[in-house]
Amino acid sequence: MSGSQRWALGVLIVMVVTEVANLSEVASTFDSAPVFKAVMALGAITLVAALRNPQARARLNRWTVVGAALVGTYFAGQVIAMLDAFDAAAAQEVMWRSVVDLAYLLIILMLIQVTGRPWTVAATAAATVAVLALLTVLNYASGGHQTFGGLALISEAKGELITTARYTGPYNDSNFWGRLLVVGLPLTWALAHRCRRLDERGREAAWLVAGIVMLAGVYLTQSRGTFLAAAIAVGVWFIVFGQPWRLALVPPVVLAASLAPGIGNRMVAVFNDVFASGQRHDVDLSVLAREASQEMAWSMFRERPIFGFGPGSFTSLVPYFTDRIPTAVHEALVAPHNLYAQLLAESGVTGLITWLVLVGGAITIAALRISSNPESVDRALAAATITAIVAWSVASIFLHLAYFRSFAIVLALAFSLGPPVRVPLPVVKKMARTASVWVVAILLGCGAAAATLATMKTPAMQASQKLVMMPAGPADEWNAYMMSIRGRDGFL
């Protein structure tokens, strides 16, 4: 490796570590230094300098173009939604962040291709997540007194039936930290498999231990969405890695895990909160807030189904939709707590389709790498990226779009893993048939589950809000709360 390639690889590692560890946000609590801007500028300059070398330019291939086209498709959907945005200022701010985040994705993609080190990027991301999870465990062991400079924080939010404090890693919310953990898990499995193939037993054991530490971090989040995403990640890994028979191990493991305090009882509680019949007044407030925000998002989607109200417009619309939903609002709502409801509300069907094109394209490229050479050690990395994308997507059923750049690293890895040679048509057809079988099975299962749950569902809380007077004074984020209070029926 030449000196310029080593420098590019070093910058790439710095960009990955900085983003995965959320150092820009952590540093902002101590100083106003523009950490992310500096790292982004360094990456862009390094890429431009590296591409002056003809050999480096030759490493960019058709998958670079495909990745850029997929990114451009998603961005185009957001631009269309912005043209008639309800809150133009918020839409412009969100779009600027999207430009920066998507540029970050493309820089990471091209640096991976220029250096030819996707495994190094995967190892860097996994090691960073593992170290953060270890710091979280050490903070727990110290009784929650060691935050390690903001890298192992504890959430102020209290959940129902939690058995520990809710540890958030370097983030302010344990749910977002959990979404990152389920991305790191499959990367450790792939790295352990690679070490086994290379007969590096010590490193294999280290990566397996890193995975166990991440699972401990998952537990300390006390996030039900993270628990579900981690369980699904295990099943997806077995399928994509070519060992579907091991799915038989998942139910007993899940059953055993559900016996742990804070897992099974919390999953049962949230099921009862959302789907149990009868009137109740002891509903988990976090569940109530999510239900109200998602009902609001679906109501927005029904009003503008094609292009939505514009990126970033949800918060501004909350006061206008508070009296249109059956679940009473008990706090200021700032996001739908569901990525897909957010996309539908803010950018309509167009935004959701373009997002699915971006994510589905990344999965397809990684799957083509597996189909082109199933015996290659790179199959493990491709399987890990697919698993990470699916796990992140499942966790996003309960979260809105935030901290996108950490997910962008996984998308860039998937784009960089495109097969170097054209995949034979019979192989593509076989892959399509296999994927179709799994997709149909999953859709049928989800459809049956949704139909069953829909017949059981009753609102957790109901409010009659036929006419609500707008609060006097300047509008702020608490208007929705005041309107909700005015519209409720008392029961005492």
Image (cartoon, rainbow, N blue to C red):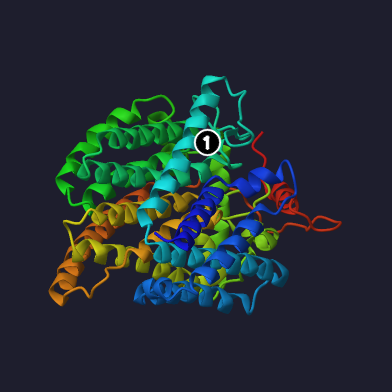
The answer to whether residue 37 is above or below residue 194 is: below
x 42%, y 57%: residue: 410
Q: Residue furthest top?
A: 142
Binning the other alpha carbons within 10 Å of mark 1 as few (below 14), some (14 to 19) or many (20 upward) gives few
Q: Residue furthest right?
A: 473
Q: Position of residue 22 (x, y in %)?
A: 58, 47
| 74 lies left or right of 335 | left
Q: Position of residue 401 (x, y in %)?
A: 54, 57
User: Closest to the observer: 302 or 13?
Assistant: 13
The answer to whether residue 54 is above or below residue 238 is: below
Q: Mark 1: which secondary structure?
A: loop
User: Closest to the observer: 14 or 190?
Assistant: 14
Q: Position of residue 466 (x, y in %)?
A: 66, 58
| 231 lies left or right of 108 | left
Q: Is residue 302 visible?
A: no
Quadrant position of the N terminus in the picture: bottom left
Q: Residue furthest front?
A: 3
Occupied quadrant, residue 370: bottom left
x 66%, y 54%: residue: 465
Q: Is residue 368 visible?
A: yes
Kind of residue indicated by mark 1:
Arg
x 26%, y 42%: residue: 195
Quadrant position of the C terminus in the picture: top right
Q: Position of residue 461 (x, y in %)?
A: 56, 44
Q: How many marks?
A: 1
Per the image, the residue denoted by label 1 is 280
Occupied quadrant, residue 211: top left
The answer to whether residue 137 is above or below residue 314 is: above
